[in-house]
Amino acid sequence: MSFLENLSSYQLDILKEIGNIGSGNAATALSKLLQRKVDMTTPSVKVVSFDEVMDLVGGPDKLIVSVFLRIQGEAPGSMFFVLAPDEAEQFVRQVTGLKKFSFEEYPIDELGLSALHEVGNILSGSYLSALSDFTKINMQPSVPSLNMDMAGAILSEGLMELSVESDYAIIIDTTISEDGEKSSVNGHFFLLPDPESFRKIFKALGVED
């Protein structure tokens, strides 16, 4: 049985608490950027198999939008913030006020793409900062990249790296909503520490098996 399969509910609760702290920091940063109140929640943190990762996004042939960054420092790894295209379009419309932003209309509005890239950067960086503060492990984000492609093409690089040690990944669900708005945007953080980073992170959290 792999290390990830042995994670206890207590360990997952700690990861969820880190997710909540990261979400709170990201919501504060987004609220300042947009000058209106933004709420973020972390409804669940779970460990899933690679097949389930693909199922979560609709299968390897499903089109997804992702912000990818490489985690650098003492516990390297990869992080993806993934949205379905329609969720990403809704997100951009809420953030920018662009009423007609769509990935199906060419050329795709550069302002919308830039906003999505920046917001993904803020969200990913906030979660990574919370994880780094909690563990006291130096972890810095690389310059993030925005991609839209089939899930199998986007996620395969990070999953192949992790497959050296395990067939599982940590998924942090995130819901983003604006004050006064009934609709919300649902995204997933895929946290993929490199194999040697897993034990380092959990040892720092004091919950090593």
Image (tube, helix red, strand yellow):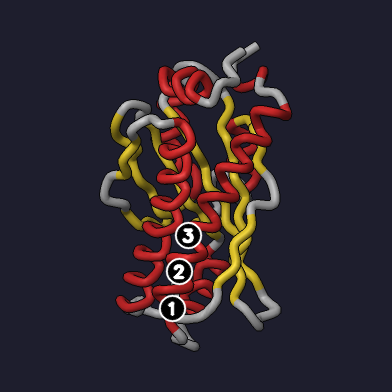
Q: Position of residue 132 (x, y in %)?
A: 41, 37
Front in this rendered view, residue 118 or 32:
32
**139 displayed left or right of 65:** left
Q: Are marks 2 and 1 in contact (CB under 8 Å)?
A: yes
Q: Are marks 2 and 3 in contact (CB under 8 Å)?
A: yes
Determine whether the residue tagged by mark 1 lies in a helix, strand or loop. Answer: helix
- What residue sits right under mark 1 in the picture? 34
Amino acid type of disc 1?
Leu
Residue 78 to residue 92: above or below: above
The residue at the point 37 percent across, 56 percent down is 147
Q: Position of residue 29 (x, y in %)?
A: 43, 65
Q: Which mark is residue 30?
A: 2
The residue at the point 57 percent across, 16 percent down is 208
Residues at marks 2 and 1, CA–CA distance in whole angstroms: 6 Å
Residues at marks 2 and 3, CA–CA distance in whole angstroms: 6 Å
- What residue sits right under mark 3 in the picture? 26
Q: Residue furthest left?
A: 143
Determine whether the residue tagged by mark 3 lies in a helix, strand or loop. Answer: helix
Q: Position of residue 41 (x, y in %)?
A: 63, 58
Amino acid type of disc 3?
Ala
Q: Which mark is residue 71?
A: none
Residues at marks 3 and 1, CA–CA distance in whole angstroms: 12 Å
The 10 Å Cα crowd at callout 1, few under 14, some 14 to 19, many 20 or more, is: few
Determine whether the residue tagged by mark 2 lies in a helix, strand or loop. Answer: helix
Q: Earlier in the sequence, mark 3 or mark 1?
A: 3
The residue at the point 44 percent across, 86 percent down is 98
Amino acid type of disc 2?
Leu
For the question of whether residue 63 can be seen, the reply is no
